[in-house]
Image (cartoon, helix red, strand yellow):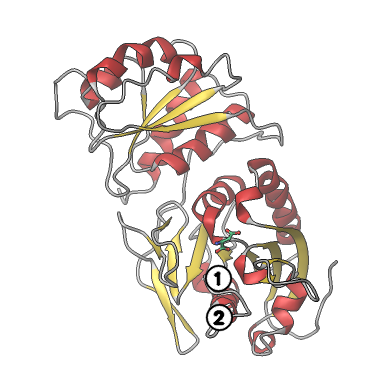
Amino acid sequence: MSYRSGGSRPRVTVFSLGGTIASTHQPGSPPAGVVPRLGARELVDSVPRLREVAELETVAFRRTASSDLTLPDVVRLAAEIARRFEAGDAGVVVTQGTDTVEESSFALELLVPGPRPVVVTGAMRDPTLAGPDGPANLLAAVRVAASPQAAGLGTLVVFDDEIHAARFVRKTHTSSTATFRSPSAGPLGWVVEGRVRIAFRAPALRGAPTGVSVRVPPVALLKATLGDDFRLAERLPDLGYAGLVVEALGGGHLPSPAVEPLERLARRMPVVLASRTGGGELLRETYGFPGSERDLLSRGLTPAGFLDGPKARVLLSLLLSAGAGPAAVRDSFEQVNASVFAS
Ligand code: ASP
């Protein structure tokens, strides 16, 4: 499961979770699509130059499509990463399916205390295709994880030679190798000719939940659409949900029939208001019409700030796992938001 290669280079552990970077055909079976089969050791062995960069350990942590990863998986992974840091690793790389990188990387950012870097990467072209991007992404990710410049930047996503902050990054394309973008902030830096270039330093995140367990209560994410009245929302407690994130229209707006159901729901469970636009910050004090951001926030919804729906759902889920009540939820969202901007 785990092995070590010697040397005096910084030590980096590569955890593999599956995904396209690890996906090949089943041998001997008729073509039926690629599935995650390779582990961290095979991934590392396929890129000999990695050993010039770092002393590597490998852990095959999961072997799954990232659509089957869960927040409890990430909570367990965060505990393993913390152990690696206690044992002296300079950094850690996580390889996984790209579909949920924007959520798992943000969960790791909330769960793993700094300053040593956690770097998440993957691939869009699997190893059976021409020009697979996994090897180049893995090499760049290890370079960043081994780099002193990456310390204190929180969890990073390194992909297509760009370095993104987990708090901002989104998957934006179904097949492009340049799928990862940070629409609100841009990348923090890049890797060129093997050099790690950090152009901007993101402040350390504050307000992360403490005492998170692997029991993570279900949190729903509902996206607003033209004319939807959110009649589904009030059924959520009966379905076992403990919280809701609403991806509202534009700067934080909903069709007016949705307002009262959500106000009632916010008395029973935390309801967080985010934007479905994918970039920018939720408005707080511009519009005054029924269903506007001012209206909704005055009725007890919690503003997600710069967090998009999936990332707000990660934060709310981990807070509820840690037993946070409504005031602590609100406070954490405020602190996370206040901490990411230079003061
Ligand atoms: N398309 C995915 C990937 O890029 C599959 C997954 O997320 O597991 O890895």
The part of the image, by quadrant, that contains residue 125 is bottom right
User: What residue type is disc 2 on?
Assistant: Pro
Instruction: State if disc 1 and disc 2 touch (CB < 8 Å).
Output: yes
Residue 265 placement (x, y as % from top left): 43, 14
On the question of residue 224 being in view, the answer is: yes
User: What residue type is disc 1 on?
Assistant: Ala
Residue 222 placement (x, y as % from top left): 42, 31
Q: Quadrant of ligand 1?
A: bottom right
Q: Is the distance from the Cβ of mark 1 to the nearest ligand 1 atom less than 8 Å?
A: yes
Crowding at dot 1, Cα within 10 Å, few <14 / some 14-19 / many 20+, comes out as many
Say left or right for 87 vs 216.
Answer: right
Q: Is the distance from the Cβ of mark 2 to the nearest ligand 1 atom less than 8 Å?
A: no
Which of the two residues, 288 or 163, is positioned nearer the viewer here? 288
Q: Residue at x 52, y 19 (%)?
A: 236
Q: Which mark is residue 123?
A: 1
Q: CA distance from mark 2 to mark 1?
A: 7 Å
Crowding at dot 2, Cα within 10 Å, few <14 / some 14-19 / many 20+, comes out as some
Say left or right for 129 vs 3.
Answer: left
Describe the element under mark 1 as helix, strand or loop.
Answer: loop
Say left or right for 281 vs 193.
Answer: left
Describe the element under mark 2 as helix, strand or loop.
Answer: loop
Q: Residue at x 62, y 71 (%)?
A: 21
Q: Which mark is residue 132?
A: 2
In the image, residue 64 sits, relative to residue 320, either above or below, namely: below
The part of the image, by quadrant, that contains residue 165 is bottom left
